[in-house]
Amino acid sequence: MDAVIKPLRAAGADAEASSKSGSSKGGSGTARPTRSEAEAAVQTLLQYIGEDSSREGLVDTPRRVVEAYDELFRGYHQSPDELLERTFGETAGYDDFVLVRDIGFTSHCEHHMMPFYGKAHIAYAPVDRVVGLSKLARLVDVFASRLQTQEHLTAQIVTAIEKTLKPRGVAVVIEAEHTCMSVRGVGKEGASTLTTRFTGLFRTDPQLQGRFLSMVRGPER
């Protein structure tokens, strides 16, 4: 019998609770700042770069930035386990792997808090149950909506699929451009980073891994 999927807790609910009580816990276990404290921090940054935070165009900027952060980093309030909880067993004996290609995403580098964006390609070899295809795309969004490194993002996606679905193997390829490298620092626009992770059959069977990579590249690439 299929499990009943639980609704994900909205990021806005946590943010609103924090703004009222200031008692939410951050990743380090310390008290989470209130919304007003977060807005004050943005105002400090504006003043740090030499802006007049009281001028007309910037009066509402602290509020807008905090609201944007609630949206961009909503992944901290979402559960990948709950997302993959519901599976389906009516596969008519399907015994090949499932591939979802070209899953677009945007994340933020944890070193400079600047965006990196690209595509993720995910495949898994199910045992007897599969997950809805949209859930794989949503899984990418959950982890991408947190401060990340591309390597960590790749590993987290694989680990979540293995933990919940327990397939015969998982393969993930992520290709992305990092703005912390393209618009600052070395300024190499167009440079892309590729990360991969293979487990189970995709690690032990070179032909299966090769077929996956060939399907990811596609005839037009």
Image (tube, rainbow, N blue to C red):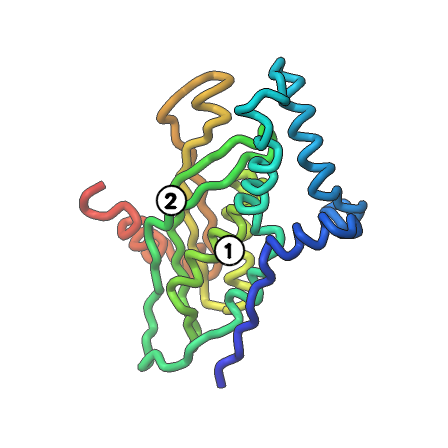
* Image coordinates for residue 160, horizontal then vertical, percent: 55, 59
Which residue is labeled 1 in the image? 158
Say which quarter of the image contains residue 42.
top right
**Does residue 43 lie above or below 119 as drawn?**
above
Q: Which comes sooner in the sequence, label 2 or label 1? A: 2
Mark 1, other Cα within 10 Å: few <14 / some 14–19 / many ≥20: many
Say which residue appears at 55% left-offset and 57% top-offset: 159
Q: Nearer the viewer, residue 44 or 57?
A: 57
Q: Nearer the viewer, residue 30 or 129?
A: 30
Residue sitting farthest toward the bottom: 1
Mark 2, other Cα within 10 Å: few <14 / some 14–19 / many ≥20: some
Say which residue appears at 57% left-offset and 50% top-offset: 74
Taking 96 as reference, is 32 left or right?
A: right
| Element carrying mark 1 | helix
Q: Amino acid at mark 1?
A: Val
* Image coordinates for residue 164, horizontal then vertical, percent: 54, 67
The label on residue 191 is none
Which residue is labeled 2 in the image? 119
Q: Nearer the viewer, residue 117 or 208?
A: 117
| Element carrying mark 2 | strand
Say which residue appears at 66% left-offset and 17% top-offset: 48
Residue sitting farthest toward the front: 56
Q: Are marks 2 and 1 in contact (CB under 8 Å)?
A: no
**Does residue 189 lie above or below 209 as drawn?**
above
* Image coordinates for residue 53, horizontal then vertical, percent: 63, 22
Q: Nearer the viewer, residue 125 or 104?
A: 104
Q: CA distance from mark 2 to mark 1?
A: 15 Å
Q: How many marks?
A: 2
* Image coordinates for residue 35, horizontal then vertical, percent: 69, 42
Q: Amino acid at mark 2?
A: Lys
